[in-house]
Image: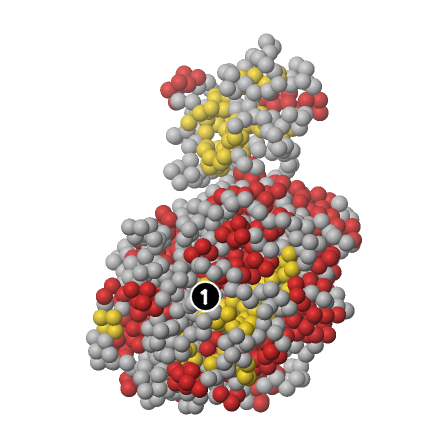
Amino acid sequence: MKMSTRQPRLRSRIAFVAPFAVLLASAIASNVIAQTTPTIDSVEYVNSRTGQYYRTDIVAEITALDRNAAASGWARTGQSFKVWRTRADAPVGAIPVAKLSSIDLSTPSAPKICGLNKVAKIGAEGSAPTNCPVQTSVTFVMPPDALGDCATGTQPVFQVRNSTGVRLANQLDVYQDMFDRGWQTDGVTMCVPGTSTTLDADAYRLLKQATFGPSEAVLAEVKQLSISGWVEAQLAMPVISRMPALVFYPTTAPTTCTSDGVANSAATLCARDNYSHFQLQLKFTQNALNNADQLRQRVAFALSQILVTSGADSSIMPYGMAKYQQLFLDYAFGNYRDLIREVTLSPVMGDYLNMANSNKPDLARGIAANENYAREIMQLFMIGLYELNLDGTQKLDASGNPIPTYSQTTVENLARVFTGWTYSGVGGVAPTRNNPAYYDFPMQAVQSNHDVGTKTLFNGFVVPANMNANAELDMVLNHLYSHPNVAPFIAKQLIQKLVSGNPSPAYVERVARVFNNNGQGVRGDLKAVVRHILLDQEARGPIKTERGVGKLKEPVLLGLAAYRALGGVNDGVWLRTQYAAMGQDLFRAPTVFNYYVPDNTISNGKLGPEFEILTSTTAFARANFLRNLTNVNYAADANVQGATGTTINWALWQALAGNPTALVDKLAWVLTAGSLSTSARQQVINTVSAMSTTDTLARARTAAYLVLNSSHFQVDR
Amino acid sequence: MNAPYIITRRRLLKSIASAGAVSAAGTFEGLGLSAALAQTAPTDYKALVCVFLFGGNDANNLIVPMETAEYNLYSTGRGGSTNGGIAIPSDQLLGIRPKTLNKAYGLHPSMGPLKTLFDAGKMAAVTNIGTLAEPMTKAEYTAASKLRPEQLFSHSDQQMQWQTSVSRGIERTGWGGRLADVVGPTNGSNFPMVTSVAGSALYINGNTPRVVVIPQSGTFGLSTFGSATDTTNRVNAMKNMMNLPAGNDFVMEADDVIAQALGASDLLNPIISVNTSPVNTHFTGINTGIGNQLRQVAKLIEARAAIGLKRQIFFVSIGGFDTHTNQITAHNNLYGQLAPALKAFYDATVALGVANQVTTFTMSDFGRTLKQASGGGSDHGWGSHQLVIGGAVRGQEFYGQFPNQTLGGPSDLSTNGRWIPTTSVDQYGATLAKWFGVSASDMSTVFPNIRRFSNTDLGFLA
């Protein structure tokens, strides 16, 4: 657990003296001198008057700086760590670092820094004062491995730079803060003795990507299993989460299942459970809050936002939608080709995009085959509008224009492929003509309603005449699936929904390659795809300081992540009701284009899908949801079986409320794992500190509210 | 009372950066945003209200030709009025007679309130309008000798093209947003010039942050808790946090959205929360999404003095027009919501004394095939009809050409009744923009391809 003890005072103009340089090993080999303890302290100071930073590992300087703090303005920043005194003390492979400057405190109110050379000599003094002999030292650290990780028993030190010099920080939030201030981030440059919190931070990051939000309990699992071990365990876990088992009800509700205007009457509750998405939204929320198969659920949720159907289409019955959503849980780690077939023949999709009961063209009556599913399976579910490179970028023709993947003629031909399909008869009985909507079984074909003419699809592919509707469907799905766009098109969207809205083309390409071949020659293996998405170098690491990495928490994730982190009792009954006002009415997307489109851009042109539904209205809806989350205890609803109500256990947080710094640090860790910057954290601490010391509940709630509302929680990166 | 509106410094800097990025975006002819802004400060008040019909409205059943020969072509094309056909029986249509054409047409049976406006000269229709990169005939379409809009018949792309007026290439700003960019600097206030009551939309995105999104009902601001002092401190802390430097683009974007919302709420919340507004009476009994949205717009127009803007653009929408099946039922419902809401809004502007200063217009993804699709609906088409309403409208008229209703005929790009537009989105928008006060020299900034079209004022606004 990270517990920073003090905040450095940072100014907008920061001067700096670079105290360390990594030396060539050969240059100092003769300097090794036996010492009494294996490690010594390396302490960073900041001067409150000049904004200068200074780091030293010389005991005399540390003592002098601490003793003269009041007069000189030098104070510790908290970025202190140990380094090995000699090569012999350090593990094999250690590298030397040298301190190249000193500080003169002979006049405490006018401290001077001097260095070995002019580059290192920054400060008010024009030249090195004569009474400031440079005291050098050489100590040892370990280099990080190629991925920037530090070995067990060591902790990483992050380096930031700007034109004035270099800082070394062992705390992520400091690193984050300097990044926010525009310093260049160099990542982990050395490993020093200690226990790393960055592994925890990386694990937290993983849990933002692979679960509905980190919690202390799941964090412990990851630490025990390692990141890749935990991912494998998740991928191997069978389906735990189930959508509710709703039974058939007719499209037109019987009076016994129509709200009679009496609250909680049998008929009203029947209508709630069978003619609204109440039970689906509730079960989804409970599964996401509680069930162990988190990665499966996250992937299923992502797929359900690519292969979209919507309960906002009032003709679609909830018992059907429950089966449709279960497909994604069942196939989350399956094969995309298999999933596409299930989706195509799902009666819910058949209803939503009108493949159900689309008959062969009737020339006499001037009726054409319905084009809806034909268009959207290509545009949204399989290949997209334009030819793509493997890295997801558009191919361009000789004139520099994007190349369409298909034409209106293709759509019209494909529409005729998808003719003749209708709802199954009750109990799965084969249909003989167009059946009314019924969602308990996949659609089936009525050959006499199927267009048996030839059809020409993209790339000159011809479907021969007189094919059986079933055989033709598989042939054509194979054809669509053979398009090289499928891998980058689906890989990129999965990355966007799990890790980052704006993935680099190289990341997309690495995942697309796995989509095309899982290593055993299998294409479309979602298990392999998800594994690579999570373990890719662009996904891993304790913190990402690239400007364009990240994504806004979508509303469903915002609610779930807040509760999973803060804990307490939660039956999902209240939370279920909250998504819609924030712009994500669960299972009721406004159109087949989902709540937001994958190519929505933010103001600087980067891809930020979820930002499409972040407006001034929904921003308030989010803030006010968090206001209620932190302030209201929701009692159990007697009309929901097993309801417990929704309450956060504030006692845990009230215990810390006497010490605002400790309270905020703990919240910042649980909710943002080091990505809340020190400046943002200070705002929260100041606000809480100004509140009555006796009202610990108000303090805890205010601290949580502010951290939850900070963009460092709202954005996952 | 004119509350100051906060635009963060960072946001302004970003605006400049993004304006520079647009010219490199590979649009059809470039946006020419470096053109000098030639606007002069307006002294009167004017508002444009965009009503977007999401899903692709089948305007073939909104306005039906009723001269016998044309009606018969229409009815045949739609499979008649029985046995699953989607033609509207002529005896159900509401007869109208555009003055210049002087021929019989019929409005959809659910359009009664708008027939009143049409007959009173307060509404006009622009017929067979659609996305175009340049004018083209059927022969030119067939020969592919002219540039076609990209991805015709695709919802997302055609919505984008209607909203941007750019039909080739990716464009990140809408013509409503660019209109605000051009007019904004002379507009009397730095409050956002564009208000959406229908969420975010490409149409309203400009290069400068002039958009606020308000809810169609309820309050617009932070819910409070705790003591007054604690609340003040807490809200101030939030504002401070939103203005901290951020090294991550997504953090910065999220910061900016909430910071802007907090600024807008102080001014707008009291306006939209008031229950005693005189506009309410006009919306009595209209409890629909589109009605609620237009009521909010009317309330903001009522409060125009407090807001301090001389020019405003509003965006509202209604969805559900993707009528692949069961179109007859769906249209009765949708038009049954749309028509009373538009009439109530017009009446409210009359009551506020601004009927001549507010122009309402429709847009939609595309028209639909005249030929019916399996299941009693129609498929994605192209050219369509749009409505323009307001005191400044030269009403009781059709503007543009009415499509020939013959399947496979001169208006049909193929055989299913997809009309090749004879009027472009650019021309439609430029006519509205000219009335709004955009100078001729700024017109190509808002509509980069307008010079592809000879007639830039369709004449429907006085």
Q: Quadrant of residue B153?
A: bottom left
Give the vertical position of A304 relative to B188 (above or below). below
Residue sitting at 42 percent across and 82 percent down? B70
- Label 1 chain ID: B
**Residue A51, can we see it?**
yes
Q: Residue at x 56, y 52 (%)?
A: B439
- Examine the rendered structure and indicate whether residue A135 appears above or below residue A347: above
Residue identifier under label 1: B423
Judge by depth and name the residue closer to the eye, A644 or A468: A468
Residue B299 position, x and y percent, is 70, 65
Q: Residues within 10 Å of mark 1 (few under 14, many from 20)?
A: many
> A570 or A630, which is in the foreground?
A630
Residue B374 visible, this orientation: no
Q: Tell me the residue at 51%/31% (across/down).
A: A161
Q: Secondary structure at mark 1?
A: strand
Seen from the viewer's position, the closer of residues A473 and A539 is: A473
A426 and A399: which one is in front? A399
Q: How many discs mark residues in the rendered view?
A: 1
